[in-house]
Amino acid sequence: MSKMLEEIREQPEALARTLEGALPAVAELRRALEGRRPRLIVLAARGTSDNAALFGRYLLEITTGIPVSLAAPSVLTLYDAPLDLEGALVVGISQSGESTDTNFVVERARRRGALTVGITNSAESTLARLPDHVLLVRAGKEESVAATKTYTGQLLLLYLVAQTLGGAIRERDLRRVPEWAAAALKLEPEIRRRAERYRFIEETVVVGRALNYANAFEFALKLMETCQVVAERFSSADFLHGPIAMVGLSFPVFLFTPAGATWPSLKQILEKLHARGAETLTITDRGNPEARQLAGRAIVVPARLPELYTPVPYIIPAQLLAAILAEEKGLDPDRPRGLRKVTRTL
């Protein structure tokens, strides 16, 4: 069994540890923000952590009303642009804490007047030392190159950041996230049966929107890293503005389809894909029976989930599918071709 699969299975416990362990640091951050509401939030990250940041952008803007930007590190690392970050909150996200350009952004932001936060899985890392405040993912060592448990831990900590800034995030709901993750893991036998169908795919599209847009990026990244599948990723809105033209008969498309505000546009996409004869597989939950009925095939998380909290339980079936599909293809998901666990760029 791969390390990737083992680490996927560890997520309920890792999430519970992360939540409990972060509460003192979150309380300290809340005190620091009293009377100092940021005018802007900037999230800096690379790779899987950048996908977590994309989720954070939607979450923070939806729940707090504060504008959020995803940092372009080269603005600082290559051009040394004199950004005015006074009154901003800058959050660096890195599973290893050793992402060179992410750390550079945090260091420069602190010098230029921002309040800085680091989110990392390593208490001994550079990112744990640089910022004003540190929130630790407590996932334990992640050995597989393909990040899984650190990604969901980062999402959970971003919920806590949103809560600290006044977002309507209830602690009792956050305490259910490990339970919902455990429910998603129960789908492994079904996903193992389904994976064989996709053994020979070489290209695909992954579609999500809003809070699950980041999951579309993350699932596509896992398919590229571990399965050597060319995986494009789109929001359902962008997909209709041209890229849907690539889809024809039997073309595989994966979709994240929660109930709620994004469902009407996702339903429209499904109807158009079916008219084209595409092969669709949706990841949904019991709260959206219409998605189960409309989809060609559906992986249904056995719980009724509020849309706000779907990203963690929804990505777990996708992680499982990527890990198992890699094995079906005769690949080692723990050692993707040409990749290392820590990547340093400037």
Image (spheres, rainbow, N blue to C red):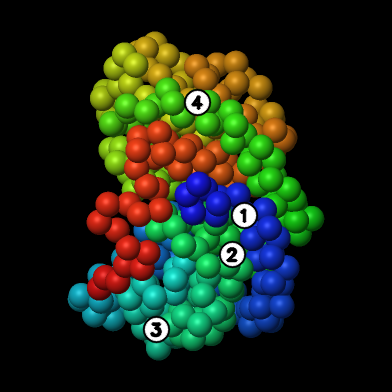
Q: Mark 2 packing: few (<14 Cα in 10 Å), some, or many (20+)?
A: many
Residue designated by label 2? 139
Of helix, strand and loop, which one carries label 3?
A: helix
Q: Which mark is residue 107?
A: 3
Mark number for residue 194?
4
User: Is 318 above or below relative to 42?
Assistant: above
Q: Residue furthest left?
A: 79
Asked whether residue 14 appears in the rendered view, the answer is yes
Judging depth in this view, the residue of 223 and 35 nearest the camera is: 223
C-alpha gap between disc 3 and disc 1: 33 Å
Mark 4 surroundings within 10 Å by alpha-carbon count, few (fewer than 14), some (14 through 19), many (20 or more): some
Q: Secondary structure at mark 1?
A: loop
Q: CA distance from mark 4 to mark 1?
A: 22 Å
Which image quadrant for residue 199? top left
- Tell me the element at label 4: helix
* Residue at horizontal 30 percent and vertical 71 percent from the top: 344
Amino acid bearing label 3: Glu
Q: As rendered, which of 248 and 75 lies closer to the eye? A: 248
The disc, 2 or 1, on the residue closer to the chain's N-terminal end is 1
Q: Residue at x 65, y 66 (%)?
A: 18
Nearer the observer: mark 3 or 4; the answer is: 4
Drawn side of residue 138 relative to residue 236, left or right: right
